[in-house]
Amino acid sequence: MNKPVPPAELMTDEDGPLYAPRKKVYPQSVSGRFRSIKWRLMAVCLGVYYLLPFVRWHRGLGAPDQAVLIDFPNRRFYFFFIELWPQEIYYFTGLLVLAAFALFLMNALGGRIWCGYLCPQTVWTDLFYAVERLVEGDRRAQMKADAGPMTVNRAGRRALKHAIWLMIAWWTGGAWVLYFADAPTLVRDLATFQAPAIAYVWIAMLTASTYLLAGYVREQVCVYMCPWPRIQAALTDEWALNVTYKYDRGEPRCSVKKAFDIRSLGEKAGDCIDCNQCVAVCPTGIDIRDGAQLGCIQCGLCIDACDAVMTKVSRKAGLIGYDNDINVQRRVAGKQEIFKPVRARTVVYASLITVVCAVMLYALMSRTLLDVNVLHDRNPIAVRLSDGAIRNGYTLRFLNKRGFDRVIAIDVDGPAEAKLHVIGSDSVTPDRPMIVLARDTTTELRVLVTTPFDEKAEKSVPVTFRVTDIGLGEVASATDHFVLP
Amino acid sequence: MSEHNEIDRVSGRSTTGHDWDGIKELNTPLPRWWVLTFYATIVWAIGYWVVYPAWPLVSGYTTGLFQYSTRASVATDLADLEKLRGEKMAVLGNASLADIEKDPALLALARARGKTVFADNCAPCHGSGGAGAKGYPNLNDDDWLWGGSLDQIMQTIQFGARSGHAKTHEGQMLAFGRDGVLKKDEIVTVANYVRSLSGLSTAPKFDAAAGKKLFTENCTSCHGDNGKGNPELGAPNLTDQIWLYGSDEGALVETITNGRAGVMPAWVGRLDPVTVKALAVYVHSLGGGK
Ligand code: SF4
Ligand code: SF4
């Protein structure tokens, strides 16, 4: 065989597997404006998550008094003054739509600020890093220790770190299950091993996933696993504020002393002193000076690091900052910086959010607390009785969303001379059956509608079941068809 | 092996040395985690063979280490389910049929239980919704051969009709033609008379008086003087609009000539008493009850 000789630069013996082994990131601690914003947001997020299940909300006798509760056995969802039934699952669709638009809006204004400040992955990873630094020391100490041999001291510290991590993870999983049952009771049951097995299973799963994701996988979730960076990259535009290294100001990089020399010659020296602080603090281990990139979660820590350096060398802060390419170009061209938070894109997102909110609020306010659904018998669709009359069978399902029992009357409209019979209820008012709906439940009844035989009657006419609350006058109705055989 | 070192010019990667019509295959190894996962599944599979019943043998199978059996675990699951239901079913068992229908919760429970049992056992003949078919009564209408009260329905489900059970419903439609009791033209006359009882049209040359005479002599002992039937004997009402085997002249002639004796099996031994009760309530609630 005639072998082509590859050019020298293409010669390679290392066609390794198609995956890049992970390089461990040792982000250095930093303090500053964005760091303290992050601390505060972390406190708020974790506080809400851990404490919300214990907030009480009075709903009346017999109803759960937990402000936020997902009650699977009884199929109810409670959120402060809102109580949702499974039929109203579309509210969650609304919430998801809202969440999506909120993300879009955030993205149009400030890029991936969700990622940098609010995402659970970021919050917990940040917390785990803090624990790690507290126990094993900062970046330098950790790197040195990892390069050196294992000592008793080091092993002890490592064990302590994992113990604390596991405790946080376990507490995280524990808080999760509290949203699904009365929190104080569940805490007691968990402690005395009386809680249902499923609770322990969930705690175990969430402990494991928190520990793994925040302790080990860390920034790789953002870089390899999360779909949001890909989506946001497609949604962003040139106006969005992103963490940006202002290369117009920073380049060429040179030491303070060299810059002094160059400048005294009247030539341009950049402000970046190439100290690599921004790289050292970055939790995803990237160099922001390479430009906008997928790995950047917009946490702003490099801004804090760089600002500290600039202050130290008595230069103006903000070499790295929330900025966009437009402004870099404008500064190069000697123009004024501009920021435009109000643009077509942001206005559209904001108005969509408003509209969805308004629709949901309206739907919530006007939702009915009495409801009826109807299902026609399929087999047989219609029955002929011995005297020739025609009868159709239906299943009616009533929803009483109020916290008290109520008496309802059922009327039927549609087929001529229709008579209604409710199976199992020999009502004292035979022409207008009345039944009791227990509070906060669904009731299913089988009803029969009979009409005398009429040769000229239509094959199928609409039939409407009207339900009236005798006490409150609330009305609900459902329509199906009355069919001839 | 020498080709392994060949380098592709464009991608700069090595090739496997395989060459099809001048097209060469690049050497693209699988990621390590993938390969390790693959090996792990092989190890897992071998472990599985050992631990669980797996290999068919000539007269049996390898039973594994723990004598695990899916059959046994289904049986335990079913037993657990019965235990779980036991309490509620006991309430059903202790209540009277009439009480069950009056209590909405019990009614719903009996209907739910009855519905599944009906689908399993009764639907093959009576249809999934009890609509019936020719020869198999529609359970949704108000015409009942053996009576449509709760107790009567329960009785029929328990012991069936012509089922051979000691307490079953008996009673047959005789074969007047086959047994030579009536002649062909007499049968046609009776058939037309029966049609006239429920207001159906009759043949042009039909002799009503002769029909009435033949009917009185042969049929009233079971169907009654005016043809209204008799649930004691399972004799249908001939004056209403419901016909189990059809109401046209041909169908009636066939019925009178050869007789009818549909069979309903007895469920008493096959279904437990509470289930039969639930079934009776369900069938009654289809709407047919009287
Ligand atoms: S990339 Fe994904 S996981 Fe990472 S911070 Fe952003 S949203 Fe969270
Ligand atoms: S480059 Fe800066 S903003 Fe981006 S992730 Fe790293 S430290 Fe955070």
Image (cartoon, coloured by chain):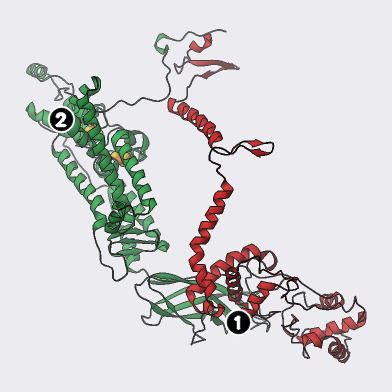
Chain colours: A green, B red
Residue at the disc numbered 2: A306
Tell me, yes or no, if residue A117 can be seen here: yes
Residue name at image x 31 percent, y 41 percent: A210
**Rendering coords of residue B261 (x, y %):** 79, 73
Residue type, numbered disc 1: Thr
**Rendering coords of residue A374 (x, y %):** 51, 70
Q: Does residue B201 sit above or below A287 in this rendering?
A: below
Residue name at image x 48 percent, y 87 percent: A428
Report how far apart the C-alphas of labels 1 and 2 lie in the structure: 85 Å
Residue type, numbered disc 2: Cys
Whichever of labels 1 and 2 marks the residue nearer the N terminus, that label is 2
- Classify residue A133 by image quadrant: top left
Quadrant of the rendered image holding ligand 1: top left
Q: Residues within 10 Å of mark 1 (few under 14, many from 20)?
A: some
**Rendering coords of residue B136 (x, y %):** 72, 71
Q: What secondary structure is found at the residue carrying circle 1? A: strand
Q: Nearer the viewer, residue A360 or A115?
A: A115
Residue at the disc numbered 1: A451
Q: What secondary structure is found at the residue carrying circle 2? A: helix
Residue under mark 1: which chain is it in? A
- Classify residue A357 by image quadrant: bottom left
Quarter of the image with the N terminus of chain A in it = top right
Q: Nearer the viewer, residue A13 or A138?
A: A138
Q: Does residue A325 sit above or below A45 in this rendering?
A: above
Q: Nearer the viewer, residue B144 or A94?
A: B144
Residue B144 left/right relative to A47: right
Quarter of the image with the C terminus of chain A in it = bottom right
**Rendering coords of residue A10 (x, y %):** 42, 13
Q: Nearer the viewer, residue A475 or A469?
A: A469
